[in-house]
Image (tube, rainbow, N blue to C red):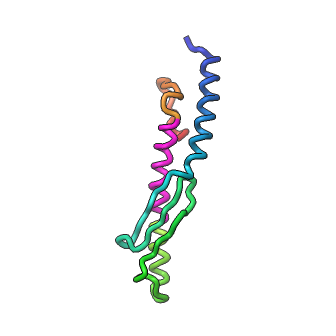
Amino acid sequence: MFDMMSMMGKMKEVQAKMKEAQANLVNVKAEGESGAGMVKVTVNGTKQIESLQIDEDLIKPEDKEMMQDLIIAATNKAIQEVEIKSKEELKKSTAGLIPNIPGMDLSGLF
């Protein structure tokens, strides 16, 4: 039989775990690179750029447009990677807390 009080307690526990997990996303890091490693960008789980590395061979005024394109490509790769890692981190933090109810897809929460 479905125990509503137990479920409500679980939901509060899930909310607390989710809040804690989201706060810890700042510690999740991902790196994207482009131009065979000439440009590297590191972002955290809150999708903030933490570092940018540009190979010295690229720092020429005539290469400005290419450098901008490489930075954009590296940043987008890092953001895609950190999105995957963030979802994995949130799933780990709430493992076993959300019940497996047949027909109910809760994957959108992550």
> Main SS of the magenta segment?
helix
Q: Is residue 77 above or below residue 25?
A: below
Left or right relative to 87: residue 5: right
Q: Which residue in the rendered view is the most extreme toward the left?
A: 36
Q: Taking 71 as reference, is 58 above or below it?
A: below
The x, y position of residue 66, in whole percent, is 45, 79
Asked whether, in this view, residue 5 is left or right of residue 54, the answer is right
**What residue is rendered at 56% in x and 42% in y?**
21
- Residue beneath the point at 45% across and 75% down: 54
- How far across and how far down the image is residue 94, in percent? 52, 34
Give me the residue at 44% from left, 68% from top. 40
Q: Which residues are magenta?
A: 75-93
Image coordinates of residue 60 in percent, x first then y, are: 46, 87
Residue under the point 53% across and 56% down: 44
Residue 65 part of the magenta segment: no
User: 25 above or below 97?
Assistant: below
